[in-house]
Structure formats: C-alpha cells, structure tokens
Image: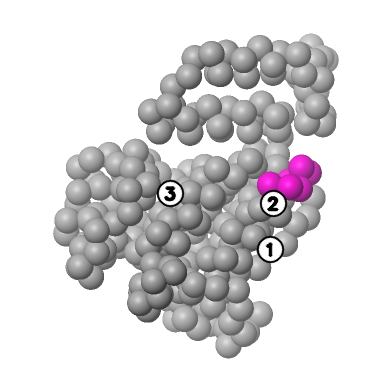
C-alpha cells in the first residue's frame, strides 16, 4: 500500500477478527474529523457482527522514515464548533465499550489524543523503540474527563502527572515499566507475536470473555455491582461453552467453543 494513498480508517473482517487500520501514513496517521465518524461507524458494524471475537487496531506506516502509529487528532478540528475534544472523546469511549476483546498493535510511536485509543484497548502489543507523548498542556488544552480517568487507571497517578504536567516523551523502557503492554517486539517478529496474542484470545469462550471484559471495565470505572456480576457468573455456568470446556478438560483436548 502506497504511503501517498491516504484514506479514512479501513476495516477488514476475516475468521472472527476485525482489523482496523489507520491509513494516513504520509500525515503520520493524524486523525481528521471525518475519520472520527468513520471509526464510530466501524465500531457499530463490529458490534453487530456476532462472529467477531477480536478487534485489532493498527496503522499503516508504509514509507515513514520512523514508524508513527498516530500523531493524534488534527487540532484544526477544534476550530469547528461541532467537533473538538467532545467529538474526539466519543471515539475512545466507544472503542473501550466494544463487545469483542480489543488489541492495540502499536506498530509506531503515538502522540496526543491517539494515546487514549491505545489505553481504550483491552490488550496492547508494541513495536520496540516506540515513543509516547501527551502534549495537551503544552498546547494550552485541558484533557477531556474520560481520557484523564483512563490515564490514571492505567498509568497510575504519578506517571499520569508526568505525562500531562511535563509533556515529555515516554520511552519504550519507561512504558514497559508501567506494565501497559504484553511485550515490546522487534519489527521482524511483530506480525508473528500479534498472531499469537490473537490466537490466545480466540481460544477463550467468547461469551465468558466478553462478559468478563464488561465486568472488569465496570469495576475499573468504580461501578461495582455485585448483583450484576453474580448474574453473569451464574449465567456462564449454564452455557453450552462451559459444558464444552468441562468436557474438553476431562478429555484432555482443546475445547471448541461456539459462543452459546
């Protein structure tokens, strides 16, 4: 794919995996206002495709001198009263609430609001040498509420303050110390390691995994509802998948889950 061919984010669905690709490599995959609407449309489509168990968010970095997953939101969008941070906020919020398990394949450095897309995913795999920077205050901007909440939840308050109150770059080593990523992988092994992670997620019982994701997100957001969690617990024990899991365990074989 040529780096000169710039389009809105692409969606490809195959074998239960939806791959979302940011596709403006010549602009370092900067997100424009039109891209936000397209991403929300893709999210809606994914949620309606019950066969989709895993979502991979990645970027086209073809011909970039240094791989950049996303340079953030085009700040020119803030001049449009109908958009700005409120419009952007809807995207990571919708990403975080997607039904399938989401994996960010961070195949380049990430800046600004795009860092929240990474945090909104359930799991993350990174390319060795990537950088991470949050320059909001350096631009005179107070970040939107849900993004701050995700930063504190994932970075911890000390690292979140460093990100926002210094606007300095986090190196791969500093990111690795935060425990945000499954691993940092060399370019030549990145596709293989991503497939291994996708395979691990796809080996799970989809209903149990998706309900567990929902429960964990609720707990992380401070919405602990023991009754709802208990109902999901009991419901899972009556599924065909659980019966298959027990049978497969007894027969010492890999279970074949059907999402029922």
Asked whether the viewer can see residue 45, the reply is yes
Q: Residue at x 54, y 77 (%)?
A: 24
Q: Is residue 148 above or below residue 29?
A: above
CA neighbours of label 1 inside 10 A, class few (<14), some (14 to 19), many (20+): some
Q: Residue at x 69, y 16 (%)?
A: 235
Q: Give the extent of the magenta segment.
A: 47-52
Kindly give the residue lying farthest to the front in the view shown. 81
Q: Distance between the residues labelled 3 and 2?
A: 19 Å
Q: What residue sits right under mark 1 in the picture?
A: 11
Give the structural element (helix, strand or loop) at label 2: helix
**Closer to the eye: label 1 or 2:** 2
* Mark carried by residue 119: 3
**Looking at the rendering, which quadrant does residue 189 occupy?**
bottom right
Residue 167: percent from left, percent from top: 21, 62
Residue 201: percent from left, percent from top: 65, 38
Marks 3,2: beta carbons within 8 A: no
CA neighbours of label 3 inside 10 A, class few (<14), some (14 to 19), many (20+): many
Give the structural element (helix, strand or loop) at label 1: strand
């Amino acid at each position: 794919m040529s780096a000169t061919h710039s389009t809105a984010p692409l969606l490809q669905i195959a074998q239960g995996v939806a791959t979302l690709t940011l596709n403006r490599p010549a602009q370092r995959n900067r997100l424009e206002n039109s891209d936000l609407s397209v991403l929300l449309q893709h999210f809606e489509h994914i949620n309606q495709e019950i066969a989709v168990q895993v979502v991979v968010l990645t970027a086209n970095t073809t011909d970039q001198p240094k791989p950049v997953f996303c340079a953030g939101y085009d700040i020119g969008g803030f001049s449009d009263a109908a958009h700005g941070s409120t419009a952007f906020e809807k995207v990571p919020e919708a990403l975080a609430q997607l039904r399938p398990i989401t994996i960010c394949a961070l195949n380049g450095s990430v800046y600004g609001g795009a860092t929240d897309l990474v945090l909104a995913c359930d799991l993350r795999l990174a390319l060795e040498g990537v950088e991470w920077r949050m320059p909001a205050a350096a631009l005179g901007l107070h970040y939107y509420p849900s993004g701050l909440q995700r930063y504190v939840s994932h970075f911890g308050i000390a690292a979140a303050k460093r990100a926002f109150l210094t606007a300095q770059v986090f190196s791969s080593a500093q990111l690795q110390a935060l425990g945000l990523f499954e691993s940092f992988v060399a370019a030549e092994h990145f596709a293989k390691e991503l497939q291994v992670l996708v395979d691990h997620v796809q080996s799970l019982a989809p209903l149990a995994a998706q309900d567990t994701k929902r429960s964990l997100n609720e707990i992380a957001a401070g919405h602990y509802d023991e009754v709802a969690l208990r109902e999901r617990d009991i419901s899972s024990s009556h599924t065909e998948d659980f019966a298959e899991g027990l049978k497969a365990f007894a027969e010492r074989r890999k279970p074949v889950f059907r999402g029922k």
